[in-house]
């Protein structure tokens, strides 16, 4: 069984995804996590602390991604673009839940931007040229958004990835 803190954050994600930020009350999250409200408050003193815990989880994913990025430009671009093709893992679930906080929890916007930058930090180091690295990041972010929405076009997306790699070869 997952540690209580993780179960609480998992429950928060579920509530945010199903009911939005308005439904993410301490009582609802505690019930979903199978803990008492006092047990939830032991780990998170307030709703804001709970949201910060979710955003900390997101940050950890960005830092881990940075550590996994290959150091050569083509490998980094391929890794980033290939990773942008799927949206069904636990980190993506955390991201989707965190996106629900935008507009209702002001710190979420800056934290989300930092997460995206952390994910692309290795890409920027490997490619060197900031404009080319940003172009690869934005293409990857767009591919990822389409994967999140379930609206990707696999043959077209493969051609887009090939075109970006060709651009890197010329840069």
Image (cartoon, grey):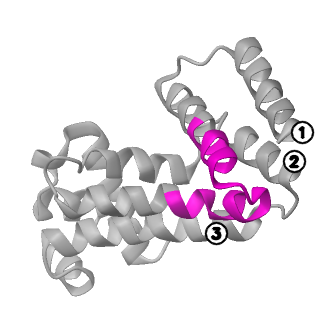
Circle on res. 56: none
| Marked residue nearer the N-terminal end (3 or 2) | 3
Q: Is residue 96 left or right of residue 46?
A: right
Q: Residues within 10 Å of mark 3 (few under 14, many from 20)?
A: few
Query: Could you say which quadrant of the image residue 37 lies in?
Result: bottom left
Residue 128 locus on image (x, y percent):
74, 60
Look at mark 3 in the image and give the residue it sits on: 64
| Marked residue nearer the N-terminal end (1 or 3) | 3
Q: Is residue 137 left or right of residue 44?
A: right
Q: CA distance from mark 3 to mark 2?
A: 20 Å
Query: Could you say which quadrant of the image residue 28 lies in?
Result: bottom left
Looking at the figure, which quarter contains the C terminus?
Answer: top right
Residue 67 locus on image (x, y percent):
71, 71
Q: Is residue 120 magenta?
A: yes
Q: Residues within 10 Å of mark 2 (few under 14, many from 20)?
A: some
Look at 20% across and 42% down and name the residue there: 20
Magenta-colored span: 117-138
**Labels 1, 3: front one:** 1
**Labels 2, 1: front one:** 1
Q: Residue furthest bottom?
A: 42
**In-front residue for pair 26/121:** 121
Q: CA distance from mark 2 to mark 1?
A: 8 Å
- Which element carries disc 1, helix, strand or loop? helix
Query: Could you say which quadrant of the image residue 64 lies in?
Result: bottom right
Residue 148 locus on image (x, y percent):
50, 31
Look at mark 1 in the image and give the residue it sits on: 169
Q: Is residue 133 magenta?
A: yes
Look at 54% across and 52% down and name the residue there: 90
Look at 27% across and 83% down and name the residue there: 43
**In-front residue for pair 101/23:** 101
Look at mark 2 in the image and give the residue it sits on: 74
């Amino acid at each position: 069984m997952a540690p209580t803190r993780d179960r609480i954050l998992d429950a928060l994600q579920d509530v945010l995804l199903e009911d939005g930020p308005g439904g993410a009350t301490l009582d609802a999250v505690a019930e979903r996590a199978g803990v008492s409200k006092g047990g939830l408050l032991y780990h998170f003193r307030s709703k804001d602390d709970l949201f910060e815990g979710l955003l900390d989880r997101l940050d950890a994913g960005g830092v881990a991604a940075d550590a996994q990025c290959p150091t050569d430009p083509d490998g980094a671009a391929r890794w980033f673009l290939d990773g942008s093709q799927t949206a069904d893992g636990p980190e993506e679930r955390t991201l989707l839940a965190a996106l629900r906080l935008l507009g209702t929890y002001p710190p979420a916007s800056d934290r989300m931007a930092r997460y995206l930058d952390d994910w692309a930090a290795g890409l920027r180091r490997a490619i060197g040229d900031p404009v080319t690295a940003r172009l690869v990041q934005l293409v990857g972010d767009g591919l990822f958004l389409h994967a999140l929405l379930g609206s990707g076009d696999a043959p077209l997306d493969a051609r887009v990835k090939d075109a970006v790699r060709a651009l890197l070869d010329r840069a």
